[in-house]
Amino acid sequence: MHQKETFKKLFAVLAVVLMVLPFLVTFSAILTNMFEKLGWYVWLQERIVPFEAKLLAFLLTLVNINVKIIAGSHVVIWLQKEGGHFWSTTLSWNCLGWQSLIFLSASLIFGLRGKYKLFSKIEVVILGIVGTFLVNLFRMFLITVLIYYANEVAVMVMHDYLAVFMSLAWMIFLWWFAYSFVLEERQAQDERKVINV
């Protein structure tokens, strides 16, 4: 029963996101500006962005895209096109998908309520964090491949809109998988304790 409630909430969020997507993109930009003014992004920019840029560069070499990374206040990724021409794109802390981590955190708060074993809850948290990291890395990979092969409109649509749907699809899959295979209820143990007393 609790599983259905979480899925209902996720689908309700999907419906709301579809209606307010343009406003979400604008709100995300406002939050980004706020974080930049407060300086909360510095650690991410200095530590995480270079690491993810290296992972992204590795993935791009798997599809035969030559890459050069230049680190500075932002990480610039140079994509070498045919004929030796380079195309650059910037990877910053805002590209990491921090919005999906906020959404993951909210879904964990609602989704893990209930009588589940602590270890299975920890497994879901780890699965959620690792999966969200990989989905965001794949999203950055797709956007960069689009930069290389497609035009700016396709990149903008993917970057600003389809990325939200990737995150939502991941959340729906995560909770289906968690409820189907990972989360274990504590009721059986509690009943045995009552019988033994």
Image (tube, rainbow, N blue to C red):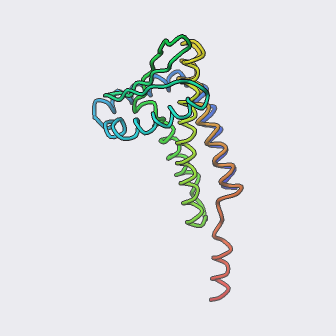
Q: Which residue is located at x 65 percent, y 42 percent?
A: 172
122 to 128, vertically: above or below: below
The C terminus sits in image quarter? bottom right
Which sits in the foreground, 181 or 92?
92
Extreme residue toward the bottom, this view: 197
Extreme residue toward the left, this view: 38
39 to 123, vertically: above or below: above
**Picture coordinates of residue 138 (x, y %)?**
58, 34
The N terminus sits in image quarter? bottom right
Viewed as shown, does residue 187 lie left or right of 49? right
- Count of numbered tags: 0
Q: Which residue is located at x 64 percent, y 83 percent?
A: 194
Q: Which residue is located at x 31 percent, y 36 percent?
A: 42
Quadrant housing residue 77: top left
Viewed as shown, does residue 79 lie left or right of 2? left
**Picture coordinates of residue 124 (x, y %)?**
58, 55
Q: Which residue is located at x 32 percent, y 40 percent?
A: 43
**Picture coordinates of residue 86 (x, y %)?**
47, 15
Quadrant housing residue 17: top right
155 to 190, vertically: above or below: above
Viewed as shown, does residue 77 lie left or right of 176? left
**Picture coordinates of residue 18 (x, y %)?**
61, 27
